[in-house]
Each structure stands twice: as C-alpha cells, then as structure tokens.
C-alpha cells in the first residue's frame, strides 16, 4: 500500500465525526441566530402533497447510493459482490464526510478496496476511474447549467447590471473550483489514457520543491498508481465507460434533486404560501444549477465534507427560493438529510469492518468470466 495501513485508518477513525459535528452545531446556532425572521412552525402542516415530496427526498437519497453501488460493480468487473459494494459505498462516503472536500475520501478508498480482496492495481484503477468520472460529470454539467440557468440569474448581484456578477463572491468561488477541477481532470486524463510516464515525471519534478517535499513519497506512489491504472483502464471497451458514466450521472443528479424536493415539500406544507413559480421547470432547473455550483465551490473548502461552508452557502445562495424565515431551517434539514446519515453509518460500520478485514489474509480476487 502507498501508506502504512494504520496511518491511513487514522484519517477516518470514527472519532473524526467530532470535528464536523462541532463545526455543524456552531454554524447551525449561528445561522439560526442571524435569521431576521424566525420560522413560524405553526404555519406548517403535513398534507398529502408535502408528505409526497418528503418521500421523493428519501427516494433521491436512495437513488444516489444505488448509483454508486452499481458503478462499483461495473468498475470492479463484478469482482465486488453486491454486499461488498454497499459496504464500500458507505465507507467511502464516510471518508468523504470526514476529510476535506478536495480530497473526497480517495486517500483511503484504495485501502477499502484492497482489504475487500482486490489487487492494488485493480483498486488503483477503480479509485482513479471513480475520480475521473466524478470530475467529468462536473466538467460537462457546469457549462450546461450555466447555459440553462444563465450567468445573470445565477450570479447577478444588482438586477439589470451584468457587471455585478464580478462582485459576487460565489462567482469567484465557482470559477476557482471549476478551474481546479479542469486542471486536475486534464492531468489525470493525460496520465491515464495517453502518457502515464510523463505524468509520473511531472509529479517527481513538482514534489522536489522544498515546500512540497514532505509529500514526495505519497506523490510518487500516486504516480505508480496512475501507471498501474492506465494499463487496466485503457483496455476497457467504450461500453464500459458509457455504463460507468450513466451510473455516475444517475447518482450525482439524484444528489442535487434532494434540495429541489425539500423546497417543494416546504412550499406545499405552508398554508396559503405556495409560489406557483417554484413548480415550474425553469425554476427547478435554476435550483438544480445552484446546487451543482455550490458543490464546485466546495472544491476549495478545507473543512471536513465542506462542513460549515455548505450550510452558510446554502443559506445565502438558495434563500431566493425559500419563504422568509425558513432559510436557516432548510439549510440545517438539507445538511441533515444529505450529509449526516453517511457520517453516522460509517462511524458504526467502520470498527467492525476493521476487525474483520485486518484479521483475514488478503488474496486478490479474479474477475468473473
């Protein structure tokens, strides 16, 4: 393995949930305290339509995970069983929840796959293919949602003044995040599919710099992983990539519809406060677009899983769709639905997985015929 296994596990120790919990509680208290108009919960009532949209929220959460599980089965050539794929999905999501958004759990995913019986070469291929597919989704979807939603609708500060876009801090966060993603996927794509040796040499040169030297060995090992993964992935047929990207699209798109359906549930639950515009296709695309842009912004955030930053950005960037007084409550509920389940499920299953995985001898699996 590219690091000592026990050192890797320290990065995702169950006690790591404490840091994002503290940040979340502090930010939750703050955003509720600064809400100018406290929410009037007496205005909410659980009618059939509200319950229906809440069930749709749960369906999106399940579909998000199903997409990841299907993708793991495809990328592993079914060497991972359904149960193993489910287990790794939740462990990987937990790792993403307790590490900075830019890392996204990839530093420990290889260990999860290796301990489930895959070779290091196969595990490296899955980790890098997963990273490539995720980044490809953002690279393709960002310009699409900008085209559908419009720069002015998404970033304009002063209505009717296009230049005010450049005064919007979220515009610059989005551009920075997209720039980072575009640079990384360009390098990874070149290394995986064109010239892995050149990327390995580039990594060696860059990490000789004095302020990067402490990560030199890890970086060199990553270069080795790219070389191993390249042999595995360049041999895959086009249909493999179509199926893998379809599962990726299915999963990420489901993730973003969670906010859409939560907002719809709120509107239908408020007596006499239904804004008819919110149910229009255009407005739903606008909400979806802002969700995707938020995730790209998180690329430059150093907190575990983007904790703290996510809630504040949701409050400030999505409040135009939410009735007055309910923005902070919606930010907390959205985060509770889309983040905390993985934090707690991972913390529960990780100790047992460690006990089982580190007791048995490792024997790499062979692909199914």
Image (cartoon, rainbow, N blue to C red):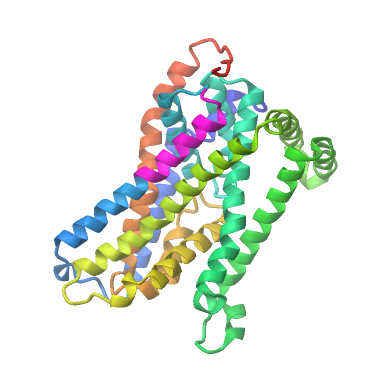
Between 28 and 82, the residue placed more toward the observer is 82
Q: Position of residue 150 (x, y in %)?
A: 54, 75
Q: Residue at x 72, y 44 (%)?
A: 189
Residue 76 picture quarter: top right
In the drawing, does residue 93 fall left or right of residue 340?
right
Q: Nearer the viewer, residue 146 or 168?
A: 146
Asked whether the viewer can see residue 353, the reply is: yes
Lateral position of residue 94 relative to residue 275, left or right: right
Which quadrant does the N terminus fall into?
Answer: top right
Check if residue 345 falls in the magenta segment: no
Question: Which residue extends farthest top?
Answer: 361
As drawn, 119 above or below 52: above
In this rendering, position of residue 181 left or right of residue 274:
right
Q: Which residues are magenta?
A: 62-78
Relative to 107, is 339 above or below?
below
* x, y percent for residue 28: 36, 60
Q: How many marks?
A: 0
- The image quadrant of residue 53 is bottom left
Residue at the spot x=68%, y=60% of the render?
A: 179
Q: Residue at x 43, y 23 (%)?
A: 353
Q: Residue at x 24, y 71 (%)?
A: 39
Which residue is at the far bottom? Answer: 160
Is residue 65 within the magenta segment?
Answer: yes
Q: Quadrant of the C terminus?
A: top right
Q: How would you classify the magenta stretch by its main secondary structure?
A: helix
Picture coordinates of residue 54, whole percent (x, y):
25, 55
- Expressed as whole percent of the image width and height from the top left, the position of residue 206 reads 82, 45
In the rendered image, is residue 214 in sight? no
Which sits in the foreground, 243 or 311?
Answer: 243
Residue 28, compared with residue 94, is above or below; it is below
**Does residue 283 appear left or right of residue 274 in this picture?**
right
Asked if residue 305 is positioned above or below residue 240 in the image, the reply reads below
């Amino acid at each position: 393995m590219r690091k000592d296994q026990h050192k890797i596990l320290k990065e995702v120790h169950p006690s790591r949930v404490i840091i994002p919990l503290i940040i979340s509680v502090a930010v939750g208290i703050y955003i509720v305290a600064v809400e100018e108009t406290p929410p009037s919960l007496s205005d909410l009532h659980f009618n059939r339509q509200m319950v229906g949209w809440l069930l749709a929220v749960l369906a999106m959460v399940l579909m998000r995970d199903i997409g990841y599980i299907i993708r793991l089965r495809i990328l592993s050539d079914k060497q991972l069983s359904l149960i193993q794929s489910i287990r790794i999905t939740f462990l990987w999501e937990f790792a993403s929840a307790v590490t900075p958004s830019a890392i996204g759990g990839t530093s420990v995913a290889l260990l999860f796959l290796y301990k489930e019986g895959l070779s290091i070469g196969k595990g490296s291929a899955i980790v890098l293919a997963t990273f490539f597919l995720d980044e490809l989704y953002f690279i393709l979807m960002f310009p699409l949602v900008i085209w559908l939603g419009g720069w002015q609708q998404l970033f304009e500060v002063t209505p009717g003044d296009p230049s005010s876009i450049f005064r919007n801090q979220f515009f610059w966060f989005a551009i920075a995040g997209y720039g980072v993603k575009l640079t990384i996927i360009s390098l990874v794509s070149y290394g995986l599919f064109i010239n892995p040796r050149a990327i390995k040499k580039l990594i060696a040169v860059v990490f000789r710099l004095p302020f990067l030297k402490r990560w030199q060995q890890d970086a060199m090992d990553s270069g080795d992983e790219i070389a191993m993964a390249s042999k595995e992935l360049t041999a895959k047929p086009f249909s493999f990539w179509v199926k893998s990207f379809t599962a990726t699209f299915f999963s990420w798109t489901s993730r973003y519809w969670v906010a859409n359906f939560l907002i719809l549930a709120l509107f239908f639950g408020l007596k006499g406060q239904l804004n008819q515009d919110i149910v229009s296709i255009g407005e739903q695309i606008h909400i979806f677009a802002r969700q995707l842009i938020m995730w790209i912004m998180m690329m430059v955030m150093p907190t575990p899983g983007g904790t703290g930053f996510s809630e504040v950005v949701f409050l400030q960037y999505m409040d135009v769709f939410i009735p007055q007084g309910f923005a902070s409550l919606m930010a907390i509920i959205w985060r509770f639905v889309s983040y905390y389940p993985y934090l707690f499920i991972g913390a529960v299953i990780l100790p047992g997985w460690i006990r089982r995985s580190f007791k048995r001898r490792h024997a790499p699996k062979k692909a199914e015929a």
